[in-house]
Image (tube, grey):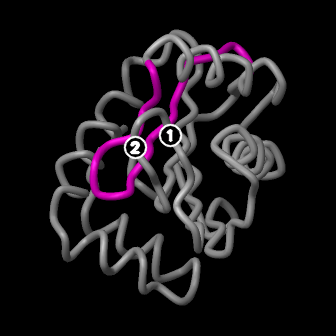
Amino acid sequence: MSITIDDITSTNLVALDLEVAGQWAAIDALADLLDKDGRLSDRDAYAEAVYAREKETGGTAMEMGIAIPHAKSAGVSQAGVAFGRTSTPLDYGEEKADLIFLIAAPEGEHDLHVTVLQQLARRLVHESFRTSLREASTPEEVVELMREQIST
């Protein structure tokens, strides 16, 4: 059975008006969405794994206003991707990001998060995809854009 984008994200995991004080608060807010959607068995353990990875790698921001924090954790019960968009770009290491994808993968998962990460990174280099994400007015539009661009 192959996994589709609909298995890992939904409109419940999209925050189009994410107003937070910085990268850590963005991670927390998106982790809360994953938790509320039932994808985390231990929200704090998962968030700590993301923080540790961000600190270890110097941040998961890409150029062009994108950050993709992610982690594998025993605190993840079901893989998920949460998306947040901020009106003011946040500092992520040496980059700034207003489009944030938080990827959660269970420990022992067969690198599904790597597949999603690679596909997101490849699609996000296209200005048209980034522009569409920035102009989307509903969570449904964001999920549809992801559905069109990402196949797992």
Q: Residues within 10 Å of mark 2 (few under 14, many from 20)?
A: some
Give the Cα separation between the discs numbered 1 and 2.
Answer: 5 Å
Q: In this rendering, would 38 be left or right of 7?
A: right
The dot on residue 17 is: none
Image location of residue 8, percent across then percent down: 52, 48
Q: Which residue is mark 1?
A: 92
Tell me what residue is drawn at x 37 percent, y 65 percent: 146
Q: Amino acid at mark 2?
A: Glu
Q: In this rendering, would 50 be left or right of 35?
A: left
Image location of residue 102, percent across then percent down: 55, 43
Check if residue 28 falls in the magenta segment: no
**Furthest residue to the front?**
94
Tell me what residue is drawn at x 69 percent, y 13 percent: 74
Q: Which residues are magenta?
A: 58-75
Q: Which residue is mark 2?
A: 95
Quadrant of the image occupied by residue 17: bottom right
